[in-house]
Amino acid sequence: EENKAEGDSGTVDVMAPCRQLLTELEQHEAAWPFQMPVNGRRFPTYHKVIVQPMDLHTVKERLESDRYKTRDDFCADVRLIFSNCDLFNEDDSPVGEAGHAMHTFFEERVTQLWGD
Ligand SMILES: Cc1ncccc1N[C@@H](C)c1cnc2ccsc2c1
């Protein structure tokens, strides 16, 4: 869906880079723990510790339903995935290591795309 902003040459899709970056995150080899919401039955303490769960599928649904008005809104939800991961998982655990790898990759791409 095109963004409503009118440039001089028609609409400008300001969220296109976010969709591209989300696809790269989904395809990353370390994305496996973050594709879908954490299952509370498999991890009964998770929702006691993590007050705002987030995952890549939820980010995709929000992006596709125009819930993000700026790229900062998008980045804040993606960063929530990694802060939740840091809080619940040991650094030297498989999920913890995957979270660090994904977070490093994400911040490097944010700098390349938006360079601020
Ligand atoms: C990101 C995260 N944080 C804390 C706990 C879980 C997870 N991920 C889930 C998908 C997950 C992560 N690892 C395993 C291993 C067997 S089932 C399963 C499910």
Image (cartoon, helix red, strand yellow):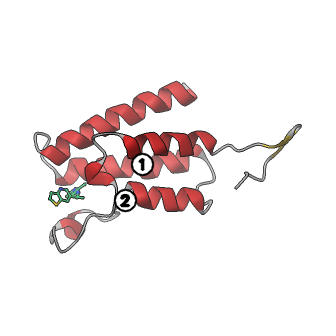
In the shown orientation, is residue 85 left or right of residue 1? left
Please, is residue 48 above or below residue 20 in the view? below
In the shown orientation, is residue 92 left or right of residue 65? left
**Quarter assignment of residue 88:** bottom left
- Identified at 33% across, 38% down, the residue is 103
- Identified at 18% across, 74% down, the residue is 41
- To which residue does mark 1 refer? 78
Instruction: From the viewer's side, name the closer residue of 21 and 82.
Output: 21
Instruction: From the viewer's side, name the closer residue of 94 and 80.
Output: 94
Q: Are the residues at dot 1 and dot 2 in contact (C-beta closer than 8 Å)?
A: yes
Q: Label 1, secondary structure: give it.
A: helix
- Mark 1 CB within 8 Å of ligand 1: no
**Quadrant where the N terminus is found in the figure:** bottom right
- To which residue does mark 2 refer? 54
Amino acid marked by disc 2: Met
- Mark 2 CB within 8 Å of ligand 1: no
- Identified at 47% across, 45% down, the residue is 22
Please, is residue 48 above or below residue 115 in the view? below
x%, y% of residue 26?
A: 40, 47
Q: Label 2, secondary structure: give it.
A: loop
**Quarter assignment of residue 64:** bottom right
Gap in angstroms between the C-alphas marked 1 and 2: 8 Å
In the shown orientation, is residue 6 left or right of residue 27? right
x%, y% of residue 4?
A: 78, 53
Instruction: From the viewer's side, name the closer residue of 46 and 61.
Output: 61
Near mark 2 (Cα within 10 A), the count class, few <14, some 14-19 or many ≥20, is many
Seen as rendered, the residue at the extreme right is 8
